[in-house]
Amino acid sequence: MSAPGLVSRDAVVEVLRTIAPEVEAAALDNLLALRHQVDLDSMDWLNFLIGLQQRFGVEVPESDYARLVSLDDLLNYLHDRASQH
């Protein structure tokens, strides 16, 4: 497990696997909509975003949810938010 606050693709996928354990990291495309790649419903997606907040110690306001679509979107956003702390 990565140290808290250390943002990486592996750490994001680790959080995702708490919601969808069948996810294979190698099969995920960083540019495609993550929610559709792993078929998450709205509650699973919300739980995933909450898990990311807890894992990386950053706040993700609900107003930002719509811009968090792909793995790249999430990684860039989390890097930016983590660097502000």
Image: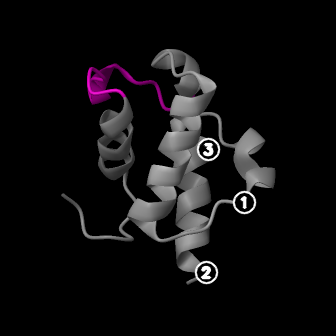
Mark 2: amino acid: Gln
Instruction: Quadrant for residue 23, please give it.
Output: top left
Q: What color scheme is it?
A: one colour
Please provide percent x and percent y for residue 5: 39, 71
Does residue 54 show up?
yes
Q: Considering the numbered disc 1 on the image, is that residue within a helix, a strand or a loop?
A: loop
Mark 3: amino acid: Asp
Q: Is residue 28 magenta?
A: yes
Q: Is residue 82 magenta?
A: no
Does residue 32 show up?
no
Overall secondary structure of the magenta section:
loop
Please provide percent x and percent y for residue 24: 27, 23
Say few, some or many: other residues with alpha carbon within 10 Å of mark 1 (under 14 / 14 to 19 / 20 or more).
few
Q: Nearer the viewer, residue 72 or 11?
A: 11
Quadrant of the image for the C terminus?
A: bottom right
Whole-Å distance between the Cαs marked 3 and 1?
15 Å
Which residue: 37% across, 55% down? 8
* Pointer 3 with pointer 1, Cβ within 8 A: no
Please provide percent x and percent y for residue 28: 40, 24
Mark 3 and mark 1 lie on one chain; the one further toward the N terminus is 1
**Residue assigned mark 2:** 84
**Residue assigned mark 3:** 73
Say few, some or many: other residues with alpha carbon within 10 Å of mark 3 (under 14 / 14 to 19 / 20 or more).
some
Whole-Å distance between the Cαs marked 1 and 2?
15 Å
**Residue assigned mark 1:** 61
Q: Say which of marks 1 and 2 sits in front.
A: 1
What span is in magenta? 20-32
Asked whether, in this view, residue 47 is left or right of residue 9, the answer is right
